[in-house]
Amino acid sequence: MPKLLRLLGGLAIATWLALPGGGAGVSEAWAQPTVSGIRVGQPADNITRFVLDLSEDVKFNLFLLPDPHRVVLDLPQINWSVDPGTGTQARGLITGFRFGQFQPGTARMVLDLGQPAEIVLAQVIPPRDGAGYRLVVDLRGATRERFLEAVQRTKPTALTQVAAAVPPLGTPRRRGDGRKIIMLDPGHGGVDPGAIGVSGIYEKQITLMFAQELRRKLQATGRYRVLMTREGDEFVELRRRVDLAREAQADLFVSIHADSIENRQVRGGTVYTLSQTASDREAEQLAAKENKVDIIAGIDLGRESDQVTSILIDLAQRETMNHSATFAQILVREMEQRVHMHKNGHRFAGFRVLKAPDVPSVLVELGYLSSRADEQMLRSPAGRARLAEALARAVDRYFEGGRNCAAAALSCPP
C-alpha cells in the first residue's frame, strides 16, 4: 500500500507532463490554488488528522460515503505541487488516499477509512506561526450507526452529486452524409489513474493517447464521426460513459484499457464482450476491478436508479450482443496480424461499461502495463499507431459486411 500511495502522490504532475500539450497551460496552472504538502498525523490517541498545505484560502465540500467507508473532499481546480514521497504513509483511521481531477473545475481527494468515523473538524486555517493556509480534517472513530447518521448530514449538494462528469453531448442525430458514429472510451482518468506500469506511467495516460491516435485514423477515412467520453484528464462515471454512447446514438462503442497484474511475464492484447457469466477467472477478476472505478473516485453508488437493473434485463436483445461478438471476432483477427495477443484473445465478463442494450460494445485491453514489452510498445507512438491501425481496419471490416454475419448469428469469415 505505501508504494502505491507514493506513486499516486505524483498523479497530477506526471499526468500533466506526459499528456500531449502538457506544458501548454502553465499560466493557468500557476493561477490556480496550489497544494504543496499532504500530511497524516495523530495529535491525540483518538484523533486522526489530515492536512493539505495550501497557497491560499479555498472553498471545499466534504461528505462521507459508506461501504467502503470514505471521506470525500471536493476542491476547486488545484495545482498539485506535492513531493510524491511526502505524507503518504497510512496512519490512524486513514488507510490510504488519492487525488486528481474529478470533473471540469473540480479536484477531488478520497480518503479510505479502516473503520467508521465522524468529522470532528473540517476547516481552512489561515496563516500563523510561520505556516501558510492549511485545510485540516480531524477524524474520530465512531459506531456504524453514528457514521451512517453523518453520511446523511454531509450528503452531497446537487452540485457535487451531478452525474455528468463531462459536458453533455446532447442528442445528436445522424447526418445525411451516412457517416457511422463511433464512441471511443479512454478508460479511467482524473482521480482514477487505473493501472500503473513498470515505468510508473498511468493507464489513464496510455488510454487517452491511444484513443486520440485511433480517432485520427478513423476520421482520416472520412467514413466516421468519432466522439470520445473524455477529451482530457478528467473522471467520468461508468454509468455516464454508457449514457454518452446512447445519447450520441453511437453505432459502435469501444472502451480502451491496459491492465496490470502480478505476473510480469504475461502480455498481449485481449478483447472483451459482455456476459453475465465470465469466460474464466481472470476475466471475472478484471471485470470486478473495473466495475469498482466509481468507488475509487468517491461516487455514491447508493443513488443508482433501477435503470441499471432494467438495462440488464434489456440485454436479452440478442442482436446487440451478436453484433458486439462479431466485431470482437474481427478485431482479434486484425490485432493478431500487428501486435502480440494474449492466448485467449476474445473473452467475456460482466463489465458495467458494456451494458448499453442498443449499442454494440467491446472493451479492448491493449496489453499489460506490468509487462515491460507491452508497456514499451504502448508508450511508443509507433507502437500505438500500429495498434490503432488494427482497430481502424477492424471497424472498416465490421461496417463493410461484418454486421450481416451478426444479424444471422453466424461467425464471420476471416
Image (spheres, rainbow, N blue to C red):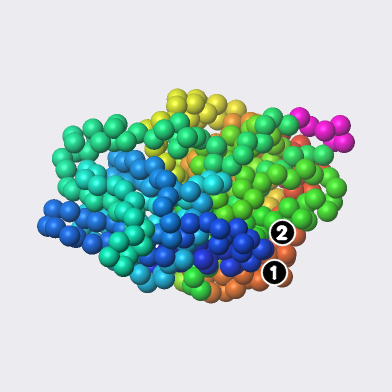
Q: At 34% across and 55% down in the image, what residue appears?
A: 126
x, y (%) of residue 148? 24, 35
Vertical position of residue 42 compared to residue 84: above or below: above
Image quadrant where one finds the N terminus: bottom left
Q: Inspect the image, locate mark 1, and give the three-letter code of the amino acid beneath it.
A: Pro
x, y (%) of residue 311? 52, 29
Camera-side residue: 367 or 123?
A: 123
Question: Which residue carries the number 1 mark?
Answer: 381
x, y (%) of residue 103? 53, 46
Q: Residues within 10 Å of mark 1 (few under 14, many from 20)?
A: some
Question: Which residue carries the number 2 mark?
Answer: 213
Q: Which residues are magenta?
A: 173-178
On whether residue 116 falls in the magenta region, the answer is no
x, y (%) of residue 37? 38, 65
Left or right relative to 144: residue 301: right
Q: At 49% across and 26% down in the image, what residue appears?
A: 307
Left or right relative to 369: residue 50: left
